[in-house]
Amino acid sequence: MSKSKLFPFMPTALKNLFSKPATTAYPFEPATYPERMRGHVEIEIEKCISCGLCARSCPPTALTVDRAAGTWTINRFDCVQCGSCVNVCPKKCLHIVPGYATPGPQKKSETFTRPTPPSKADGKVGLQTGGHPVNDHDKCVYCTLCARKCPQGAITVDRAAKTWTLDKEACVSCGLCASSCPKKCLTMKED
Amino acid sequence: MECKNEIRPIDLEQFLPEVIRFRQSGWRMGQICAVRTPGGYELSYTFVKDYDICTLRLSIGEETVVSSITPIYPCAFIQENEMAELFGVRVENLSHDYHHRLYRIERDTPFKEKG
Amino acid sequence: MAERSVIPFGPQHPVLPEPVHLDLVCEDETVVEAVPSIGFVHRGLEKLVEQKDFKQYVYIAERVCGICSFGHGMGYCQAVEHVMNIEVPPRANYLRTIWMEMSRVHSHLLWLGLLADALGFESLFMQSWRLREKILDQFDEMTGGRVIFSVNCIGGVLKDLSDEQLKTLLKVIDEIEAELKPILRTFLQDYTVASRLRGLGVLSPDDAIAQGAVGPMLRASGVSYDARMTGYAAYGDLEMEPIISKDGDSYARCEVRLKELLQSFDLIRQAVAKIPAGPIAVPVKGNPNGEYFNRIEQPRGEAFYYVKGNGTKFLDRFRLRTPTTSNIPPMVSMLKGCQLADVPLLILTIDPCISCTER
């Protein structure tokens, strides 16, 4: 039991009365944000390969990737700035930067379009530049790493039968298989 | 430090006597949880004493009526009401029965179906 | 024979941080009975685990509540890591411990401000929250967010801290400790604060255990229990003892939380001194299959995290039993026999986090 005092807060109150406010006079003074602050997501659209991994990993589904049109759309008001898309992007073209998204009276989306147009071959719509993995069967050891890395499950490898097959419809040209192959026997080739 | 963390399956008949035994040995209420399994539910009642935790696991069918443990542990009423309201587990003898109005939700037993 | 009237308290009330509704049955100004009613912030987050990848769900688990955000992310990750038998690198454990203790400092400073507000002592409220800004700015610099950090992942943490940042953290902790001294003096020694808190809502040790109290409520009644002593994350390497008080009234709870603040500063200093170098995350392969009960010590008490996986990337069940769910029955029993003007104080003394309770 400590002794009760009558006005222990008085010195602090007097000090606060005669010192300047602790708040920043925003918006008249600019707001300073630290470097790591998660404000909004920006994309370097030239590097994007429309693999769609970011859209699949977004918890509030704020991203839409259209492979045929080559666009990347973000709904600024659904985005919770978690940074999940930045972590999974294989080309590292997404960045989360300081500065909040501007408020507005209605929800809006922003769309970015890739400068290189998507290629069409044999009338199949949806093939992107980036191509598909082609396997060099002499070097391949059938370790099944590429099949495990594929986010679409487009590669089937049978270790016993020594077969490597690609489901081209499922492939999104992200290139994760080629980068994870220990023998470097996969190359992304255009069709 | 080493502390026990065990899950013990138990039958419906031995459930209440076991809970009474926990109460008399000084264990306190941890948490009550329900999981939907095909055809029924798996109820987990966790008790804590010092730093050990012990969970009683009851596997019941959809229509089985479980007796509430509020006569033994009165503090369990919120978690049992939640279990009844969200999963549709039939609990009887609740000391404070909210009759499925604890959370003000539109759908009845939303956690009962998957997806 | 006094007449009984029912007064509805909440969900909107200037003193409540989050909406909870109580029907107070009063005789004149004395509360005879209280019926709690929750459900204003129910979002069904536990059901969402069936639709989101277990790696994505970390972001949802930490958005259950703003104040206990880091704890929920960490508890979920630890539970899944245990099910999948993933060994988190030691540096990640230390970083998690440092951030958890900073969360505790933030939470207790927030609570102190709310308590001062409930007493009507607005200047003290503002002063506590002014200190809280220092911790929030540190979080912003280290993790990118003031309240929701998004820095936990299955297998470790996502961001590393340089030696510079750790030195800055220690400097800020020293500043906060120095500025905390007048606030501590006011809370513990001011005549008006003490006269309102002493003797209010007394909970004996047996009652506390029987009614399921956890956290500072349990420790202020004399029961020595702190889930950090089980040694999860880096707590096994740090020296600490649970802080207890024998009185069991609201003043004791305030004292326990203040002393826990000072203990957190000490733990942060110990962790920064002992943090090893190394990787901050390990890669995760496969899907969780199995179940586990994890418990951590949140600022409000012990929280249980139950995870059940069935081999696919969607978990079967995720159950989060938050400390406030356990603390509501003792609160209801303490409300019996109190004066109407003391109701906000008694509600705040359990440190209610209704978003956590309802998920």
Image: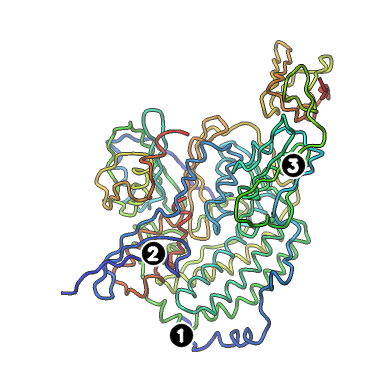
The subunit carrying tag 1 is: C
Q: Residue at x 66, y 24 (%)?
A: A153
Q: Residue at x 64, y 57 (%)?
A: A103
Measured from the top left, where is residue C136 in percent x and y? 64, 64
Q: Quadrant of residue A131?
A: top right
The subunit carrying tag 3 is: A
Q: Local crowd at mark 3 within 10 Å, few (<14), some, or many (≥20)? A: some
Of the numbered discs in the image, which one, if any, rests on residue C191? 1
Q: Measured along the vertical axis of the image, is residue B112 above or below residue C115?
A: above
Circles 2 and 1: CB atoms closer than 8 Å: no
Q: Quadrant of residue A50?
A: top right
Quadrant holding the C terminus of chain A: top right
The subunit carrying tag 2 is: C
What's the amino acid at mark 1?
Tyr
Q: Local crowd at mark 2 within 10 Å, few (<14), some, or many (≥20)? A: some
- Near-viewer residue (C133 or A51): A51
Q: Is there one chain holding both mark 1 and mark 3? A: no
Q: Is there one chain holding both mark 3 and mark 2? A: no
Quadrant holding the N terminus of chain A: bottom left
Q: In the image, is A159 to the left or to the right of C263?
A: right
Q: Which residue is mark 3?
A: A112
What's the amino acid at mark 2?
Gly
Q: Which residue is mark 2?
A: C10
Secondary-structure class at tag 2: loop
**Measured Cα–Cα span from mark 1 to mark 3:** 63 Å
Q: Measured along the vertical axis of the image, is residue C93 above or below residue C267?
A: above
